[in-house]
Structures are given as structure tokens and as C-alpha cells.
Amino acid sequence: MENEQSKVNTNIWFMSPENKNIRQIKYDFDIMTKFPNGFECHQFCNPDTSDYYVVFFDNEDGGRYNTSAKWIAPTCGVEPTGNFIIMHKKWINREEHTVEMDISPKDFKAKYL
């Protein structure tokens, strides 16, 4: 389970069918509230550092279409439906932490997709 300390004042990206844009929101909630029917994830590792990005997405193909996730969904091997969350993770002193997003969506696409 996620350490509360690693959530304090940390922004993540949230994409939902209700909004056509990627929203940056505070990570101050239980991730299951965004995925009541469960989720899967896909990781994008940075080979130069000890950090990586995790994409969480609904485990439902029949969900509502998510316009803001159509760019990331194919790389994850799923349809762009339901909610998507992207977090930046980093290992600090042998502990995994969620840290600030330090890249723009445009740069993320160029580097990882």
C-alpha cells in the first residue's frame, strides 16, 4: 500500500471520460476510488535513473470512451475507456515514492511512445 508521506503535495495526471483534457490533480486519495471495478497497470522505465512512470487503467473494455487517454491506451494494450492515471515513481533510500510529474504530456509521448 502507498505510504501517506509519498502522497503529500504530489501531482499526478488523471484522464477520465468526463473530461477531454489531461488533468493534473493532487494525489491525496485512495486509488481504488478511481477504479471501483479494479485496475491494471503498465510501467515506463527510465533507463538512465531509478525512476519510472506507472499508468493505471480500468480493467474494463466496455467502459465509456476516454478521449484524453486515446494516446496512451494503445501502448498499454487496451481500449481508451474508463479512467487512466499516470504517476511518477522513484526509489529513494530503498523506498518507492510517488513524486511530482517532471515532464509534460508532449515530452512523455516523445520519450516513451
Image (spheres, rainbow, N blue to C red):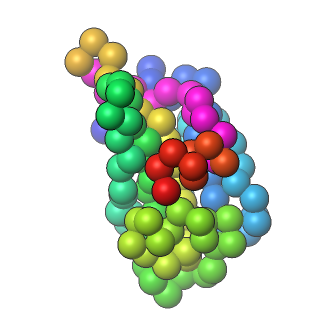
Nearest the viewer among 104 and 93 is: 104
Q: Looking at the picture, tell me which residue is in the foreground, 59 or 72.
A: 72
Which residue is painted at 48% across and 36% down in the image?
88
Q: Is residue 98 visible?
A: yes
In the rendered image, residue 105, in percent from the top left (x then y), is placed at 64, 47
Residue drawn where x is 41% and y is 65% of the image:
76
* Left or right placement of residue 38 versus residue 85 in this view: left
Q: From this viewpoint, which residue is outermost toward the top? A: 93
Which quarter shows the N terminus? Answer: top left
Task: Point out the stretch of residues depicted in magenta.
Answer: 95-105
Side of 30 where 12 appears, left or right? right
Q: Quadrant of residue 47?
A: top left
Residue 46 falls within the magenta-colored stretch: no
**Numbered circles on residues, count:** 0
**Residue 35 pos. (x, y %):** 47, 62
Tell me if residue 8 comes above or below residue 15 in the rendering.
Answer: above
Most distant residue in the bottom direction:
62
Viewer-proximal residue among 13 and 2: 13
Q: Measuring 43% from the left and 42% from the top, which residue is drawn there? A: 53
Pinpoint residue 96: horizontal percent, then vertical percent. Answer: 32, 27
Give the quadrant of residue 84: bottom right
Instruction: Report x, y in % for residue 74.
Output: 47, 72
Is 103 inside the magenta-drawn segment? yes
The answer to whether any part of residue 35 appears in the image is no
Q: Residue at coordinates 55% horizontally, 74% vertically from top-left?
A: 80
Q: In the rendered view, would you say 54 is above or below 61?
A: above
Classify 36 as above or below 54: below
- Left or right? Give the position of 11 relative to 96: right
